Each structure stands twice: as C-alpha cells, then as structure tokens.
Amino acid sequence: MDPTRAFVKDVKRVIIKVGTAVVTRTTDGRLALGRLGALCEQVKELNTRGFEVILVTSGAVGVGRQRLRYRRLVNSSFADLQKPQLELDGKACAAAGQSGLMALYDVLFSQLDMTSSQLLVTDNDFKDSDFRKQLSETVNSLLALRVIPVFNENDAISTRRAPYEDSSGIFWDNDSLAALLAIELKADLLVLLSDVEGLYSGPPGEPHSKLIHTYVKERHQGEITFGDKSRLGRGGMTAKVKSAVYAASAGLPVVITSGIASDSVLKVLQGERVGTLFHQDAKLWAPLKEVGAREMAVAARDCSRRLQSLSSEDRRKILLDIADALEANEDLIRVENEADVSSAQQSGYDKSLISRLTLKPGKVSSLAKSIRVLADMEEPIGRVLKRTELADGLILEKTSCPLGVLLIVFESRPDALVQIASLAIRSGNGLLLKGGKEAMRSNAILHKVISRALPDSVGGKLIGLVTSRDEIPDLLKLDDVIDLVIPRGSNKLVSQIKESTKIPVLGHADGICHVYVDKSADMKMAKRIVLDAKIDYPAACNAMETLLVHEHLLENGGLNDLVLELKEEGVSLYGGPRSSAVLDIPAAQSFHHEYNSMACTVEIVDDVRGAIDHIHHHGSSHTDCIITEDHQVAEFFLRQVDSAAVFHNASPRFCDGARFGLGAEVGISTSRIHARGPVGVEGLLTARWILRGSGQVVDGDKGVVYTHKNLPLQQD
C-alpha cells in the first residue's frame, strides 16, 4: 500500500460522487448502462465488506433532455420541425429525468439484492439546522438497514441561476454538494468520479500533462492549467478540485479518480495509488516524492545520446567493464538473490516462479560471458544498410540507429535485467526497467553494479530502475518520450500493458509451444527431443506445452513409449478429446494453456495437416517443431506453420537469443511488425536516412534526372 494512502484502513463511511460525464455517454448523451452497472457492483462489494456507502449522482438533466426531445419530436408537426428548435428548459429536463435516473439505480441495485433510496436537496435546505439534523438521522437509519442513500440536487425547483455559485456559498453543483454532505454526515472518505484518471498538470490530452498523485495546494495551485469545463454537466475538473480542497481542509481525505474504469473505487479502498489524493497532511509528504516517471525517461534519453556519441571501442569497453563488475560482485549478488528466493518461498510462491527467480551457481559467470560475446559482435550503430544514387551527385544512405528509450517490464527473472541492460548499451538505447517485487533485492544490486560501471561521460541515469508498481501507469502514458515497451511475463501482464498505452508494445502473450512427432520420426531422437523440450527448463516460454503425435504412433506403440518416458520424469499429462480416453489421463481444460511447470497436454492428430491446423487454432505463434525423417513432410511443416520460430528435428528450447548467437535477448516477440522471435541487438535498432548532396534543389523536379542506382555499401 502507498504510505500516502494508509488512511484507508480507518475508512468506514464513504461518499461517492458520480459525475454527468460518467453517468452518460459522450457520443449521444444517453445513460452509460455498463458504467453504472459496474459502479453498482463496486458499491455492492463495499457494502458486503461492511462499508457504509452514500452516492451523490448527476445525470438527471441529461436523461430528461433525451426524454423531452423525443416527446417534442413525437408531438411536432412537419411544419413545427421546419422552425428553429429552442433549447429545452434545464429545470424541466431535471424534473423529467430524475425519475428515470432513480428507476435505473433501483433496477441495478435490486438485481444485486440491494435497496436504494432517493434524497433530493437544495442549497436553501441546509440553512435550516433542523433539516440538517433530520437529514443525518435519516441517512444513519438507511445505512443501518444496508440501504444505499442516493443524493441529487433538486435542480427542478432550485432558485439559483447561472453561474450557479450563489452568495451563500453553501453548494453550487453536485461536486460541492458531495463535499458538503461528506462533512455534514461525518464521512471518512470522499471519492469524486470523473471521466479522466485524476487531476493532471494540464489538459489530459496533452503529452506533457502529468497525473498528479497527491495534490499539494502550495505547489500545484499555480502550476495547473485546466482544460475546458465539462461538456455534459456544469461542473468539470475545476469544480472537483475546488470541492476537494474544501473537504480536505476540513480534515476529510478526497480522491478524484476515473469513473470509466470498472474497479477504481475498490482500488481506492485497497490503498492503491489511483487518481489524485487531497489530504490536509499532503504538504508533509511532498519532500518524500521520488524522481518522476517523465524525469527518469528524459534522463535516460539524454544519457543514450551521450552513449551514441562515443566511439565503437568505448562502447565495447563499457560492456567489458560491466562483465568484470558482475563477476567481482558475484558473492554479493548471490546473497541478495538468496534473500529474494527465501522470501518468495516463505510467501508460498509457485515453484515455477521460484525457479525463474533463482540465480543458480555459475549463472553470474554465464551472464558475464554472454556480455563479452555481445561486446565482440560487429558494431551495430551506424551500419550502412543500403546506398543509392538518387541523381548525379546525390547519394542516399539507409543506416542503423537506436530506437531511443525502452521500457521493459519483466517478472521473476533477475538475469533478464542483465541481458536487457547489456543489449540496450550495445544498441545505444536508454532504458527503464521494472522488475517484479519478488526479485526486488536481486534487481537492486544488479542495477547498482551495472550503473557503477558506466563512465561519467555517459551518466548513471542511462538505465533507470523503477521500484514502484505505481509508476507504471505514468510511464505508459509517456508516448512522446518512451519509444518501445517490451513486457516479459505472464499473458495477463502483456495484455494489461497493451490495453494501457499508446506506445508500441513488443512481446508475446503466451509461450504455447508444440512438438509434433510424425509417423516417420526416429523414435529414439523423438524421446530425446520431447524430454528436453519439457524438462530442461519447464518454466521457460520456449518449453513444450503440447505434444502432438501422428495417429500411427498409437498403433505401433510409439505414443505409449513417449508417455511412459514423460511420466517417469515426473511430468503430469493431460489429454485432448482423442488422447485422454485412449491413454486414461485427465482431460485438458483448454488447449490454449501455458503450464510453465512439469505438465503438458498430449493429443493425437491424423497427420501433419492436422498438426498444423491444431497449432494455428491453439498455439501462440511462439516456437513449434516437427520430428520426422520425411523431408517432404518436414518442409511442408516449416513452410506452413505461421510461428516466429519453426524447427525440424530440434528442441524448441533452442529458441533463445544467446543460442541463436545474438549475445542475449531482450525478449521473444510474436509480433508481426518490427522484430520477431528472439529480439537481440538488431531488434532494438531502427533506420535513419542520410542524404549527401552538392547544392541540389527540387524546384518541381525540373532538371533533375533520377537514376535510383544501387551502390556498393562500402565506398571506394
């Protein structure tokens, strides 16, 4: 839990304010039924946990406007429709829409076995002390019965007029009403739901606008630039901030967060760092603020440009120094890694995760060796890929250059940090790394050793280590500073990142690798490959997850031999529809499943075409292989299987950057754009076009004779 959000442990009574932009759709102003349903489900969850939840909702005017427009259309003659249409009266819209809005809340809550109640108020009501006392008693009675009070300003009979904020200053919209009620009803927390994730330093759509996690009035009041007011309600972010500051100054914590997301309120109550927090003690926390995501990314870019300016030999020496530093600090690295492993075991993590987490004896030396191999590779930056004479004296070169700044999010494996860092340095890229919390100590010491080996001419901020999971959402918004995101981890991790960013994402969601044993396979070879594919490193993404066998092997006993070998090694087997009955093994719940453990699926297919169809329907386009002595069948398989890596008579475990001679890999990509398969140095480079001339101008192409002649890469 974020220390600034620790107050949630004492929260009992919560007021949630739902804005018009959340209740209604921006496209047509109609009710956003999905969002309201998700909100009611969150309220149900909180209610079940014992929280007292009060809603303050907008949206009546929008609902009423839709209703009255329809009635006017139905009751209008053709001649009436030719006349200019007057804007509908807002108070009439409120009166017509309130019942519809509450009816929807009633229906949604009743489907969740809950009851809601309606309370309409005006600012004048609060001038009466007896009213305020009675209001508190009524709300307490409703909450004691687990009924959800739903408040709204009674716009239909309100005496206030635009700009709505009257001289009394009691409240002037539903945001300020929510703040007033939170104080009046002695709530412990106020959550203001908006159509954006929180308060930004500028208009949310602008690239340099940054989400403010904790609002400090003394710092942020003069820095924030607000965008347009709400398109739908009469509030907007300005109104929310004003109400939040008012409530926070009275000692009430306030969070402005997204009402578009389906679980924002639950995350707030779990203490997660979502939205913007307003708290009377915020200025006391401000000095603890770490370097922000943007500052870290900008620093990495600046350092990468300095790295690129070095000579090839200087960049090579940096890698050699890092390799030496790792070996020199091996004992310290092992101590920190063993602490991580011990903690993971005590926490009950899966064996497969602990296996990935552990730096086994010799691993540091192996990493150092791979870095030295990388250092001795051909210089990747500035290589001329193509030379063309466009016209006489006009020479165009296509050259290799770094992508820029990479963000790598990885789980469990601390050795990935070393591989990724060395590849980034060799390719001249800046780097931001976020590892899993289970490898926190290992990652910290490895990052420290590598950063200390960087020369001052480059700077220690070339590689930034992101230590808080809460920084990831900020980083994923920096599409103007970060050039590529590479997630290494679970399907869930990759999917979440792809859904959360505009930055290009390179990676694979699953490692569902197949081994197909054809009828003409050398069975001695097949047993050796199948066992290696599964047991060499079961947690790896290139381990076999599905064994496909030709139906002929069922008849000649080859399938039984393979199954027996796997079982003897302790592999748990699950079958498809054809194999589970024949082999008497449990049915697999899904063919599209990555075990990452000593388990796999077995299925029988008719022939090579059946195997290919199965792979295309259930695979993840990672690595698939065929074992056969029939070269015609092998070539058919190699041409037809549409995966990043396709092997013949070789274990899928060979799909690895180091084994491919890439020195190391930043990950394995199943994408079809840019890099595919193991991503080494070349996958972290893009192209730059360099044109050399002698004063030529286009001038409508008059007098220019284009030759477009290919030239040798090396100049004479």
Image (tube, rainbow, N blue to C red):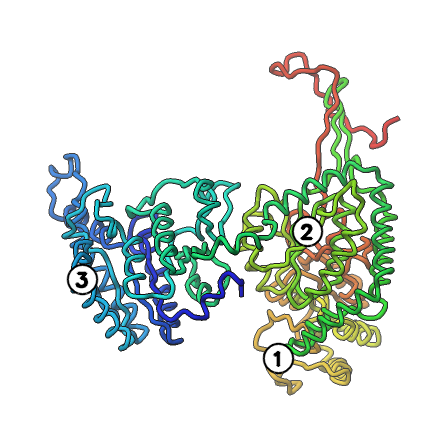
Report the residue marked by disc 3: 129
Residue that label 1 marks = 578
The residue beneath circle 2 is: 464
Q: Earlier in the sequence, mark 1 or mark 3?
A: 3
Which quadrant of the figure contains the C terminus? top right
Residue 606 place in picture, x, y as percent:
66, 72
Point 33% across, 45% down: residue: 230
Label 1 residue SS: helix
| Circle 2: residue type | Gly
Question: With 524 as the anchor, is 228 left or right in this view?
Answer: left
Residue 681, above or below 56: above
Compare residues 285 and 560 and report the one nearer the observer: 285
Q: Residue furthest toward the top?
A: 703
Circle 3 SS class: helix
Numbered marks: total: 3
Q: Nearer the viewer, residue 163 or 577?
A: 163
Percent coordinates x, y for residue 427 in the rendering = 76, 45
| Separation of marks 1 and 3 at Cα, in angstroms | 77 Å
Q: Amino acid at mark 3?
A: Ser
Spatial separation of the CA atoms under disc 2 and disc 3: 57 Å
Q: Disc 2 to disc 1, how far (Cα)?
A: 51 Å
User: Where's residue 373, x and y in %?
Assistant: 86, 53
Instruction: Please say if the residues under marks 2 and 3 sit with CB atoms less than 8 Å apart.
Output: no
Tell which tag, 2 or 1, sits nearer the viewer.
Answer: 2
Q: Earlier in the sequence, mark 2 or mark 3?
A: 3
Q: Which amino acid does the dot numbered 1 rest on?
A: Arg
Q: Is residue 487 visible?
A: no
